[in-house]
Image: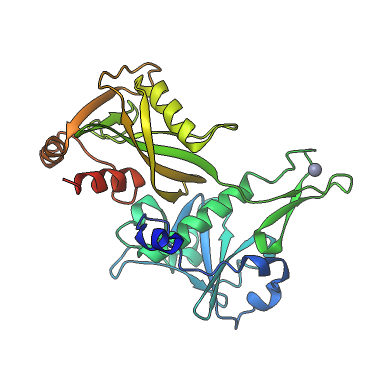
Amino acid sequence: MINHLLISSQNYFSNNPLDRLSPNRPDIDLDQALHEEASTLIVPIWQGKHLASIEEPARVVFLSTAEAQPLIQNPNQLVFLGKRGGNDYFAIHIQEEDPSTNPFWQQWGTFESLRSLGKIATLAEGAILGYAQAMIYWHSTHQFCGRCGTATRSDWAGHVRICQNPDCGKKHFPRTDPAIITLITYQDQGLLVRQSQWQPANRFSLVAGFVEPGESLEEAVQREVMEETGLEVNEVEYQSSQPWPFPGSIMLGFRAEATHQNFELIDQELEKARWFTRAQLKDAAAAKEILLSPKMSISRMLIDAWLKEE
Ligand SMILES: [Zn+2]
């Protein structure tokens, strides 16, 4: 059953091809893995962006350890991602001010946002970059201990940060923030919504929000739908999930059937909401009256799966 779910989920950023080797992380020999003759690939990340050559043939750039020697002098800035074939993969956080003026980077390409790489990166590369980006973000936001405020240091090849206060020594582990996203249905219609800050002005998506402490996922769906639309939903059904590295979430996709059709945009988070039949939604999208979320998003996957059920 689990296998079936894994194979059927085609969400972007999932299906990471790397073997994470999670039990081995504390024992990884960084000197060996980062030696200039090692078959290790380095994923450089600068301000949440990724190295790519956008001139034809456009490609995501992973550096060999020989190419990356100037970068890997401080192994504490590196995060082991996993193994694929004979290659280990490590992410590294690039902290310089403006790499575009540095000849070292100019020889490879430019740093591009993950959202803009959808057409260049393969699905496997997208999953590796998303994972790398989420890990680097977690490191950047856990430089100090949340319990005592002392600086932390990276260990276990980047999979733990340890408080350096000997009286505390708390270990901090990478975390991801769960958020629900749901297609609300009522009989043969689906509800699409719009927040005023979404660009462009005809962009529509689905109700979404973070799971709060002390609630189940189903309760989070019911609460978010009620808060944003005033609708009560009774049948809440899990669909699939997607790691969402903007900056460090896991999106949990649901479908929820409303008990009635009369929504009310109560908390002003939404600017608009509109019911569509499948035919109306296809026509509105074809006429560019509305713009659906990009294909890399679970929002679009949930909508497309519903449209295909006609
Ligand atoms: Zn501490």
Q: Position of residue 15 (x, y in %)?
A: 42, 62
Tell which of 171 and 66 is nearer to you.
171
In the foreground, 46 or 244: 244
Locate residue 151, reporting x and y percent: 76, 46
Q: As drawn, is 52 to the left or to the right of 165?
A: left
List x then y, in percent, for residue 12: 37, 55
Would you place residue 154 above or below residue 178 in this image? below
166 sits left or right of 263 in the view: right
Q: Residue at x 42, y 49 (%)?
A: 241
Residue at 48% over, 64% down: 105
Identify the residue at horizontal 34%, vertical 52% (top origin): 116
> Is residue 43 depicted above or below 242 in this figure?
below
Q: Indicate left or right for 165 with 308 as reference.
A: right
**In which quadrant of this rendering is ligand 1 seen?**
top right
Q: Quadrant of residue 56?
A: bottom left
Q: Quadrant of residue 264?
A: top left
Viewer-side residue, 286 vs 241: 241
Q: Is residue 41 above or below residue 96?
A: below
Residue furthest out toward the bottom: 37
Image quadrant in which the N terminus is located: bottom left
